[in-house]
């Protein structure tokens, strides 16, 4: 019998070491063979905060498995004096969904609050440059924004198309600054003229925020008193119609029946008060300071014609009938009332900084809720008008979500909009912009949140304005 061969101690050590090395190599091979998303699942996104030379702050979140696309997010309006943090997504749920799919997210605070477009656009572009310096050039850059940030995004799309590949606006002020402030003037002009004719409430030329608040409070009191009578409710509905305030505009409201005029008016009443509290006076005063004067007017405006084009004119007609009040008489009163003229220099500043030509050179996808009282869905009609007039219509697509409120999109609806633009960038053709396809994309992105895209065509915007085809009557 042959005796077993003995291995010396040094040899046994070398064998064990070799085995450990082989095991480590096998383990490394197994890890590198995993799908990228699984291998990086435990690695948190890189989170970077910083400050630009303008004083604006910025924030960046870059996943370990970055897919090469950076989303430059422009946030909404921040009132003067309110906290102004940098933002790179509309809210946390959408942010988590995007990071989980490999998108890099960036955005700035803007150096100032209020109507800050002259700060917002350069600060956003500077944030994009800072991202490139730190992480390298992106394979694709998409500008996107909500509300006032939709205006900022559209300004970037028109004036700096070389910095982006495409853009997405959600609930955006895509009608531009001049149109916005003109259409904000009309409802308060009607309220003052019909409900508080002798009050002396200043609608423009507000010297400071205290004066703006006082004017808002005085007119709000007149609206509250008017709401107690049938005639007053009809007149509030008329003012709401001049801003295209929808009859269903908050998630807390029941959707009124098509012929329940009283329920429709009650819904508008709250929105009218909200407009007085925010944009009509305090936000206007801040914007006038930037513009150097009053940048809106109603000289030459025929309010009977405006009502005839309003999305809720039927409701107004029925409420006037119910109150036994002459709608023709009130419209004549509006048309006879002393008008408000604009400061040409202020209009010029707003035109240069905040209005649009409609000339697109990169694809844009614009999405709006149908029940938005602050930035009515008809702003999309103004955008379509401007883009069509310049021959850029093939680059624009618009979609609508059947929901109330301002910017009340689900995370899934955000993802569907971004993926639709990406598909256009990948293929060179718009595909899947119909509600069925959008809802299918949304369900695939996040089946736990709503997908409510619908077929919808907004009525005309009542006071359109763009640089190529400015409105008459200034």
Image: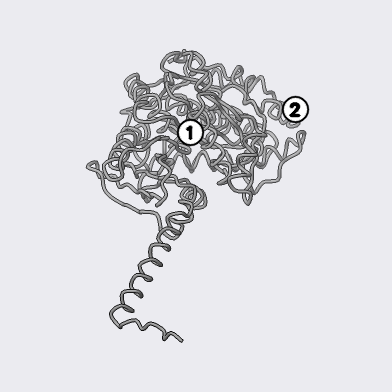
Q: What residue does disc 2 label?
A: 321
The residue that appears at 40% across and 60% down in the rendered structure is: 28
Q: Is residue 451 above or below residue 178?
A: below
Badge 2 marks a residue whose secondary structure is helix
Q: Are marks 1 and 2 in contact (CB under 8 Å)?
A: no
Task: Tell me: residue 360, above or below residue 13.
Answer: above
- The single residue placed furthest to the front in the displayed view is 1
Circle 1 packing at 10 Å, graded few (<14), some (14-19), many (20+), is many
| Element class at badge 1 | strand
Q: Nearer the viewer, residue 78 or 318?
A: 78
Judge by depth and name the residue closer to the eye, 53 or 33.
Answer: 33
Viewer-side residue, 226 vs 49: 49
Give the residue displayed 41% in from the left and 17% down from the top. 467
Percent coordinates x, y for residue 362 in the rendering: 43, 24
Q: Residue 168 — which label?
A: 1
Mark-to-mark CA distance, 1 and 2: 43 Å
Q: Is residue 474 left or right of residue 54?
A: right
Residue 405, position in %: x, y? 58, 42
Note whether 422 is above or below 53 in the view shown. Answer: above
User: Can you tell which of label 1 and label 2 is closer to the viewer?
Assistant: 1
What x and y, as percent, mark residue 42?
A: 44, 60
């Amino acid at each position: 019998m042959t005796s077993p061969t003995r291995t010396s101690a040094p040899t046994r050590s070398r064998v064990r070491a070799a085995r450990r090395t082989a095991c480590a190599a096998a383990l490394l091979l197994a890890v590198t063979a995993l799908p990228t998303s699984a291998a990086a699942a435990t690695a948190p996104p890189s989170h970077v905060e910083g400050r630009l030379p303008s004083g604006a702050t910025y924030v960046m979140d870059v996943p370990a498995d970055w897919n090469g696309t950076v989303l430059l997010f422009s946030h909404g309006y921040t009132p003067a004096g309110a906290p102004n943090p940098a933002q790179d997504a509309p809210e946390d749920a959408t942010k988590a969904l995007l990071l989980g799919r490999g998108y890099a997210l960036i955005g700035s605070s803007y150096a100032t609050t209020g109507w800050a477009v002259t700060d917002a656009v350069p600060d956003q572009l500077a944030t994009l440059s800072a991202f490139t310096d730190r992480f390298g050039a992106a394979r694709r850059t998409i500008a996107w924004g909500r509300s006032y940030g939709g205006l900022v995004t559209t300004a970037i799309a028109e004036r700096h198309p070389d910095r982006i590949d495409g853009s997405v606006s959600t609930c955006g002020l895509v009608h531009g600054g001049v149109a916005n402030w003109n259409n904000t003037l009309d409802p308060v002009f009607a309220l003052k003229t019909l409900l508080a004719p002798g009050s002396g409430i200043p609608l423009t030329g507000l010297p400071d925020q205290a004066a703006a608040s006082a004017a808002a409070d005085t007119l709000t009191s007149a609206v509250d008193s008017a709401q107690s009578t049938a005639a007053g409710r009809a007149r509030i509905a008329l003012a709401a119609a001049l801003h295209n305030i929808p009859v269903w505009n908050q998630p807390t409201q029941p959707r009124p029946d098509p012929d329940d005029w009283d329920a429709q008016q009650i819904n508008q009443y709250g929105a009218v008060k909200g407009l007085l509290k925010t944009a009509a006076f305090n936000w206007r005063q801040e914007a006038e300071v930037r513009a150097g004067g009053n940048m809106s007017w109603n000289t030459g405006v025929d309010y009977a014609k405006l009502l005839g084009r309003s999305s809720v004119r039927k409701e107004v007609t029925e409420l006037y009938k119910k109150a036994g009040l002459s709608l023709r008489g009130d419209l004549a009163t509006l048309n006879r009332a002393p008008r408000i003229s604009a400061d040409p220099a202020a209009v010029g500043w707003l035109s240069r900084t905040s209005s649009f030509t409609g000339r697109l050179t990169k694809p844009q996808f614009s999405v709006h809720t149908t029940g938005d009282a602050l930035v009515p869905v008809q702003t999309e009609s103004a955008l379509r008008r401007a883009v069509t007039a310049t021959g850029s219509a093939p680059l624009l697509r618009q979609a609508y979500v059947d929901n109330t409120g301002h910017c009340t999109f689900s995370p899934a609806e955000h993802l569907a909009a971004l993926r639709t633009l990406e598909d256009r960038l990948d293929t060179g053709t718009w595909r899947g912009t119909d509600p069925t396809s959008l809802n299918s994309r949304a369900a695939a992105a996040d089946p736990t949140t709503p997908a409510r895209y619908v077929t919808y065509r907004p009525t005309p915007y009542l006071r359109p304005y763009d640089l190529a085809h400015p409105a008459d009557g200034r």
